[in-house]
Image (spheres, rainbow, N blue to C red):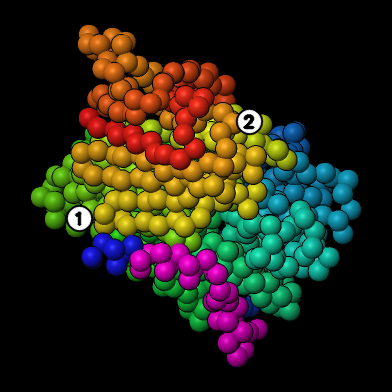
Amino acid sequence: MRRILISLLFCGAALSLSAREARHVFETAYNALPEKAAVFRPGGDWFPYPSYSDHSSWRAFFTGIKTIVGRGQSFMGRDWSANPTALKHREALAELVLAELAEGKGQFIPEITKALETLVSLGYLPTPGSRPDTPPEQRIIALHEAAYGAEVALALFFFQEQLPRALCDGVYELLRANIFDPYLNPANDRRPEMNWMAIHFDPNGEGYLNNWCSYCTVHVLTAFLLAERDSGRLLQAVAKSCKTMDAYMDYAGLDGSCEEGPGYWNMAGAKVYEYARLMCDASDGKIDLLSDPQIRRMGEWRIHVDAGEGWVVNFSDGSARGLNYAEVLYRYGLDCGSRELVDYAILNFINNDFTAFRNAPYRGGSEGERIYRALESLRYNAQLYEDREKALDAAGGDYYKLWKNGFARLSSHWYPDNQQAFLRAGKKFLAAKGGHNRESHNHNDVGSFVLFDESMPVIIDPGLNHETYGKSNKYVVWSARSEWHNLPVINGMQQAPGRSYRAVDATADPEAGTFSADIAQAYPKEAACRSWRRSYALSATAAVVEDHFELERRIAPDTLHFVLWKEPFLPGEKCDHKKVKDGEVMIFCRNFDGSKSKWMRLRFPETLTVVKEEKPITDRAQKSCWGESLWRLRFASRPDAPLKGNYRFEIVK
């Protein structure tokens, strides 16, 4: 009875949250300020860092100064006018700024000056895809422009006393023409290229919002707060940014889940937190939404997609590896009051050999705004080192015990807004999703799942493939199609793209380890499917996948797919010197570096026949996870299978 009540509770939550009522948290807080111009002042005197001339404070602030200076020196003597759209120039500017702040001897000022002079002479922010012949009134702000603008504004802010006055004026005009004016231009509010501002976003329409909202907004606001000279324009920008962030938070959902997956969380949920941090600092704490429950949950969601040992759930255009943002997660948890996030971040600072903590990186990564993220991470370093030592002391000085106990505390979670279930039992982790096929960065994967055992991939999602980027019809690419996910092909039909192709009646009980949804609506009408309820159940000993279906008519055999990392062994084949039994498939599992492995057994219905297929991989992102190829199991029914029935698969050791 208790489990029934829990299930009903989560069903009710799904229904109530699907409306996603507007909260207007930032706009409400901003509008409540009585003297806005006195709070948000031009000049950036609120910025919580020393002035450049305070060299002793900077030397105490930075760690690893020699390394940082060395990085800066590697970018000296550049030809800034050569291939100006190269992203390396933006990285170089950031490294030079950080190196000069760390050393404080003026070594890098001439190179920073050359970089800014080149940008001023160009008259635009050169980024991949930018067009120098675009008139100023037609310029737009996209991902790279926003990030570049923030870096330029930070360079101007720190070194304005060391740069020629004429150059400072030129940099301001560069920002005005490429960031400030395009952002405040009302005509851009309806331009498709800048729909990330979400000023006229219709939450009931076919469109969607994604990480562009938070990513671009944080960078643009940073530039305004540090470099805009006009008070009225600064206030317009702050007010507009509040509208964008509120629209994005309303779209994302109150439960904190990210429909784009963890591959984009760093530019989505993490940027919502950084926006809240920026607004709190710039308003001297008068707009403090860091403890807002939705923002906190956006951070904690990132914990629950962790499969261990560097693996994460990679639905959609996501990578299954390489997503450790421990320094961001630490300050996120500290600011938002989440002990869960703080503890998780500390676990991710433990070295792979479990003998020590690694140092926090001083840079923010390749996503842009390296300077701000580097400084923010350094600002929290002293507290981080103290908290890490306390955590280690509590574990008796045993790094492995600290990591193992911490990871064991991860629990099952159900996110009804985006119909994501993360189920844990013993050493097993199963993640399943419902949702719809118009999600940002989506693949046609309604109802699919992935499975890990002891942090080893068992059933996988191909994930990120750069061939899908920028395509109006990316579903011609194999890895975006439902037949290369862990799903059925119904009457010869795959799932179709679009918001109307979705799961219905999705329910989950995290405590019981179950998730189910009717996915029939994710397929076109030609599939002639009345219902197809896909269910998952996870225990410490088994993962069970079950389908209950009813068709209007039989057009083709039922075909069910499971995607694997390594080659499986079918009934009758030799596996580990033994013949595989009828009704079973042997799946080889291993961790990323191959230091541990195991065999898993997939039991399938006797009414189905199975074949295996190898898929060569050509995309570099997928190769970094899976190597040269993937494998697929294809289970098929008889051509005259009943219109109504069920299939049950069981995955055990």
In the drawing, what numbered circle is on residue 477?
2
Give SS at disc 2.
loop
Q: Is residue 373 visible?
A: no
Q: Nearer the viewer, residue 605 or 363?
A: 605
- Number of labels in the image equals 2
The answer to which quarter of the image holds residue 562 is top left
Residue at (35% x, 45% y) in the render:
536
In the drawing, what numbered circle is on residue 391?
1
In the image, residue 147 above or below residue 638: below
1 or 2: tag closer to the N-terminus: 1
Q: Position of residue 226 (x, y in %)?
A: 63, 66
Residue range in magenta is 8-37
Residue at (60% x, 91% y) in the render:
34
Give SS at disc 1.
helix
Residue at (58% x, 82% y) in the render:
28
Q: Nearer the viewer, residue 459 or 400?
A: 459
Residue at (50% x, 73% y) in the render:
280
Q: Position of residue 75 (x, y in %)?
A: 59, 36
On-image quarter of the N terminus: bottom left
In the image, residue 585 above or below residue 349: above
Q: Nearer the viewer, mark 1 or mark 2?
A: 2
Would you say 137 lies left or right of 8 here? right
Within 10 Å of the Cα at label 2, are there few (<14), some (14-19), or many (20+) other Cα atoms?
Answer: some
Q: Is residue 237 visible?
A: yes
Q: Position of residue 363 (x, y in %)?
A: 48, 47
Q: Nearer the viewer, residue 29 or 355?
A: 29
Amino acid type, mark 1: Ala
Q: Nearer the viewer, residue 100 or 34?
A: 34
